[in-house]
């Protein structure tokens, strides 16, 4: 059974940065497609970033391009999300997700494509 544990969230002022980390256990990271999603109060869960299984290709939501960077360390079995230039609109619970299959095209942005989810880590950005 794959387990995901997020860490690194917190309270930060607008313009600040955080580094979110997702520790993966139960399966080697090199055989998982990984994604980050977020959910703000009263809103649906939305795609943030993803990295594919085989090529390590990265994908980003338009709202975070140029500010967020997803990276994976197959040796440490971790996936990080560096979040810079934070805005109050980035306030949300951030979730790490893993898929057993290699996701192509738009599937990486669909929550239903992922098999495993972490409990989430809260990011709060003050103005």
Image (cartoon, grey):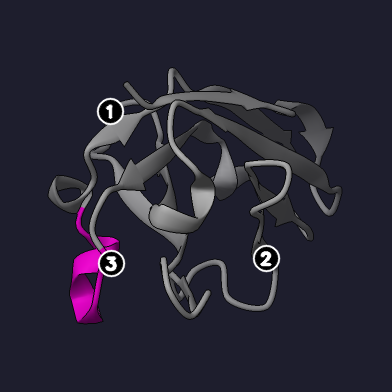
Task: Please provide percent x and percent y for residue 74.
Answer: 64, 53
Task: Compare residues 69 and 99 and report the one nearer the observer.
Answer: 99
Residue marked by disc 2: 69
- Neighbours of disc 2 within 10 Å: few (<14), some (14-19), many (20+): some
Residue marked by disc 1: 42
Start-end of magenta stretch? 102-110
Residue marked by disc 3: 102
**Inter-mark Cα distance, 2 to 1:** 26 Å
Give the number of the mark in front: 1 or 3: 3
- The earlier-in-sequence mark between 1 and 3 is 1
Query: Which part of the image, by quadrant, shows the C terminus?
Result: top right
- In this picture, residue 61 sits left or right of residue 102: right
Residue at 67%, 78% (x, y): give it.
66
Task: Please provide percent x and percent y for residue 7.
Answer: 68, 25
The kind of secondary structure element at disc 1 is loop
Q: Decide: marks 2, 1 in contact (CB < 8 A)?
A: no
Query: Which part of the image, by quadrant, shows the N terminus?
Result: top left
**Inter-mark Cα distance, 1 to 3:** 31 Å
């Amino acid at each position: 059974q794959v387990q995901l544990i997020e860490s690194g969230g917190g309270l930060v002022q607008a313009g600040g940065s955080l580094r979110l980390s997702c520790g993966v256990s139960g399966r080697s990271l090199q055989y998982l497609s990984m994604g980050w999603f977020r959910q703000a109060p009263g809103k649906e869960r939305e795609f943030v970033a993803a990295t594919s299984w085989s090529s390590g290709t990265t994908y980003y939501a338009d709202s975070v391009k140029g500010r967020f960077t997803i990276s994976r360390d197959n040796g440490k079995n971790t996936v990080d999300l560096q979040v810079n230039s934070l805005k109050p609109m980035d306030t949300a619970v951030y979730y790490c997700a893993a898929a057993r299959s290699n996701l192509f095209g738009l599937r990486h942005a669909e929550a239903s494509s992922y098999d495993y989810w972490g409990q989430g880590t809260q990011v709060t950005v003050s103005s």
